[in-house]
Image (spheres, grey):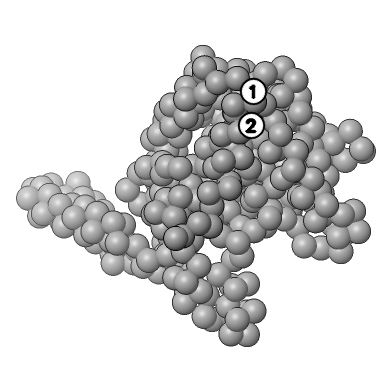
Amino acid sequence: MVLDFEKQVSEIENKIYELKQMSQNSGLDLSSEIKILESQAYEYKCELYANLKPFQKMQIARHTNRPNFLDYVNLIAEDFIELHGDRHGADDRAMIGGVCHIGEKSVMLVGTQKGKNTKENLEYNFGMPQPEGYRKALRLFEHANRFNLPIITLIDTPGAYPGIKAEQTNQGEAIAFNLKEMGKLKVPIVAIITGEGCSGGALGIGVANKVLMLEHAYYTVISPEGCASILWRDVTKAEEASEALKITACDLLKYKIIDDVIKEPLGGAHMDYNETAKNMKDMILRSLSEFDKMKGEQIVQHRYNKFRKMGVFI
C-alpha cells in the first residue's frame, strides 16, 4: 500500500524496477542510470521522512502492514506462553498477554492486537478492547507483581471499544480501575506505543515507569478525526487537528509525556520488521536495567513522580 505522500518515491522506484527488467531482458548495461536513480530515490526518501507532518506520521502508524503485537512477540520474545481470560467468563482477543523471556529477562508481555485483513480485524475487534480486555490485562499485571516479573505493554489501538455492550459492562470503570491499580504495582512497567495510541483505550495499559514510542507512532487524548468533529463539526479538518494536538513522538518527548523514541527503518516499521524489533528489544532491556537496583516502593514512587510532572509547563 502506497500512501499519498509516498507517490513520488514510488514512481522513482517503479522506474528503477523497469530499468532493471529492461537490462535483464535486453542485455543492455543500464547500471549507471539505475545507480543514479537509486541515489536520487534514497536522498529524496531521507528528506521526506525526516520532515513528515503529524498527519503523515499518523498514516504510517495506521499502515495495514505495520507490525502488530503478535509480530513483535515472534521477533523479540522467547518461550511466550499466552494466558487467557479475565476470570469472569470472557477472553477479549483485542488484548493478548503472557509470560516470556526478552533477552535474559523473564517478563509479562501484554498488548493490543490488530489484524491485517478483514477476517483478522473481526477476530481482534480492530484492536479495540472491551472491558473484559482491560480486566484480563489487570489480572496479568497482578500475576506479574506477585512473581516479581517486569511488565512490558505494547499499545496500538484506535481506542477502547465504544459500543453499547462495552458501556453496559462498564468500560469506563474498567479503564479507571486499571489506572489506579497499575499505579500501585511494585514491578517496573515499560509501555511502548507501537502504532496508534488513542485516548483511555491506550492509557488503560499505559501507566508505566517508562513510556516509549516508535518514531512514526502517535499518542493522543483523542483521534484527530474525533477532535475535528467536536471542535469544527468537520472531520475533513483532521489534518489541522493533528497539528494542534501534538501527537508525534518528537512533540511528546519535548513535553516529557514520553521518555524516549525508538528508531524505525526508513519508510516506517512495515519496511523492516526485524530492524524495528531489534531496536525495540534493545530499548526494552536498557529501560529495565535502570530498575535493577530499585526496591518495590521506589519503583512505585518513580512511576508516581513521572505522572505528577505531566502537564507542568511553567
Element class at badge 1: helix
Label 2 close to label 1 by CB (< 8 Å):
yes
Of the residues shown, which amino acid type is indicated by label 2?
Val
Quick one: 174 or 273, which is closer to the camera? 174
Q: CA distance from mark 2 to mark 1?
A: 6 Å
Left/right placement of residue 133 relative to residue 194 reads right
Q: Which residue is mark 2?
A: 300
* Residue 180 relative to residue 256: left or right: right
Q: What amino acid type is highlighted by mark number 1?
A: Gly
Could you say which disc has been placed on residue 296 in the image? Answer: 1
- Residue 86 position, x and y percent, is 84, 36
Provide residue 108's location: percent of width, then percent of height. 65, 26
Q: Quadrant of the C terminus?
A: bottom left
Q: Position of residue 252 (x, y in %)?
A: 45, 54
Residue 203 place in picture, x, y as percent: 65, 50
In the figure, residue 90 lies in which quadrant?
Answer: top right
